[in-house]
Image (cartoon, helix red, strand yellow):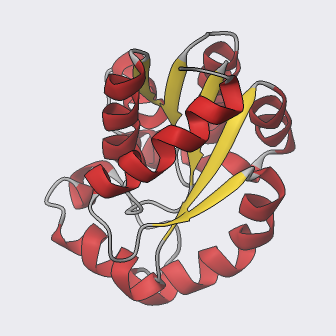
Amino acid sequence: MNVYLIGYRGTGKTTVARLLADNLGWKAVDSDEEIVRRSGTTIAEIFATEGETGFRDREAQVIAELCAGDRLVVALGGGAILRAENRQMITRQGLTIWLQASPQTLYNRISSDPSTSENRPNLSAVGGEREIHNLLGHRLPLYQTCADLEVDTENQTPQQVAHDILPLVSNHFGLP
C-alpha cells in the first residue's frame, strides 16, 4: 500500500510527498535523496563518475527496496520511469500519480531552485527549457503508461496539490 509520485523534476513531487504522508500518517521518501544518502555523494557526482547508467542502476535498486515497503509516499526521480522494471514495480505495488506542469513552468521552478545546479545535472548538452521539451517528449508516453491518476500542478501550491490528492488516495486504499 504505497503511493508513487512521478513526473519531471520541478513538478513538486518531494514537497507533495511530504505533505501527503503527513496527512496520511505514512512515511515520505524521495528516491533521489535516498540515493544521495546511501552513496554519500551528489547525483551530479554520480553522473560524472558513473554516468547515467550507473545512476539508473542505483536508482533501480532503491526503487525495488521501496516497493517492498508499506505505507510510503515515494517521490521518484523524473527519469525513474525510463526502465521497464521500475515501471512494472511501481504499477504493481501501489497507486501511481503523475504530477505535471508546462515546460516553461518547470524551467522557471528548476532555475529558481538554488540546489538544482549543484545536485542535479543537465541530462543533455542542450540544457534549459529546450532540454525539458525534448525529455518530456520522450518520457510522456512512459509517464502515461504508469499513471493511475494525473494531476496538473501548474497553478497550484504543493499544499493545494496534496489536499486534492488526499481524498483520491484515501478512496483508492479504502482509508477513513
Up the image or down, 64 lies above or below 145; here it is above
Up the image or down, 166 lies above or below 35; here it is below
Q: Position of residue 68 (x, y in %)?
A: 69, 10
Q: Is residue 151 left or right of residue 106?
A: right
Q: Is residue 74 left or right of residue 2?
A: left
Q: Position of residue 52 (x, y in %)?
A: 60, 49
Up the image or down, 67 lies above or below 36; here it is above
Q: Is residue 128 visible?
A: yes
Q: Is residue 171 left or right of residue 158?
A: right
Q: Residue at x 78, y 51 (%)?
A: 146
Q: Residue at x 72, y 28 (%)?
A: 94
- Using the image as rendered, state which of residue 23 and residue 83 is in the foreground: 23
Among the 4 quarters of the image, the one containing residue 24? top left
- Using the image as rendered, state which of residue 21 and residue 170 is in the foreground: 170
Among the 4 quarters of the image, the one containing residue 91? top right
Q: Is residue 4 visible?
A: no
Q: Residue at x 62, y 23 (%)?
A: 2
Taking the view exactly as shown, the residue that stands out farthest to the top is 69
Count of labels shown?
Answer: 0
Q: Position of residue 34 (x, y in %)?
A: 42, 24
Taking the view exactly as shown, the residue that stands out farthest to the front is 176
Up the image or down, 11 lies above or below 104; here it is above
Q: Quadrant of the N terminus?
A: top right
- Using the image as rendered, state which of residue 104 and residue 51 is in the foreground: 104
Q: Position of residue 167 (x, y in %)?
A: 52, 40
Q: Residue at x 43, y 16 (%)?
A: 26
- Using the image as rendered, state which of residue 36 and residue 5 is in the foreground: 5
